[in-house]
Amino acid sequence: MKYRHTKGNEIEGHLEIRGVKDAVTEPVDETLSIHINGDRNGLKSLAEYLLYLAELDQNEVDDNLLPNGASEHVNLRPNVELSKSSNETIVGRLDRKSMAARHWVRNVASNSGSSAWKAAIWSS
């Protein structure tokens, strides 16, 4: 799969990603749900980008574009790729270029005290 050097405006259509506090548990803990909503084009565009991330052979990407130890990701920004009310979101690969994905994922899961899935999608 060819590397997409272009960054920005990867999402077509309308897409909203928001962190929403759970009203029931909010006073007790900081439970946060991630809501991903979009129109048909926005959801399809996100799905296509996720497939691109999944299928990309990071080790085949030129070191000038993706250095060793880096992982491919995309920043989805409010009012650019996402709706105005969205939170900035980074979607990326857990494994890194020239590293064994299995080893890295295992370390993330054991060091974070939670599931590796939480490390896969960051939202601010």
Image (cartoon, grey):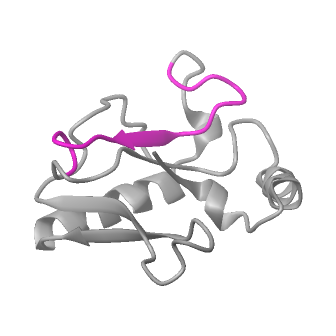
Residue extending farthest front: 27
x, y percent for residue 83: 16, 52
* Vertical relation: 23 (above or below) 61: below
The verdict on residue 20 being magenta is no
Residue 14 lies left or right of residue 36; in this view the side is: left
Span shown in magenta: 65-82
The quadrant of the rendering that contains the C terminus is top left
Q: Quadrant of residue 110?
A: bottom right
x, y percent for residue 20: 39, 67
Residue extending farthest bottom: 24
Q: Residue at x 20, y 60 (%)?
A: 15
How many numbered markers are drawn? Answer: 0
Closest to the observer, 41 or 3: 41
Q: Residue at x 66, y 51 (%)?
A: 94
x, y percent for residue 118: 63, 62
x, y percent for residue 41: 13, 66
Dominant secondary structure (helix, strand or loop) of the stretch shown in magenta:
loop
Residue extending farthest top: 64
Residue 36 lies left or right of residue 66; in this view the side is: left
Residue 9 lies left or right of residue 32; in this view the side is: left
Q: Residue at x 50, y 22 (%)?
A: 65
Closest to the observer, 3 or 40: 40
* Vertical relation: 4 (above or below) 116: above
The verdict on residue 74 being magenta is yes
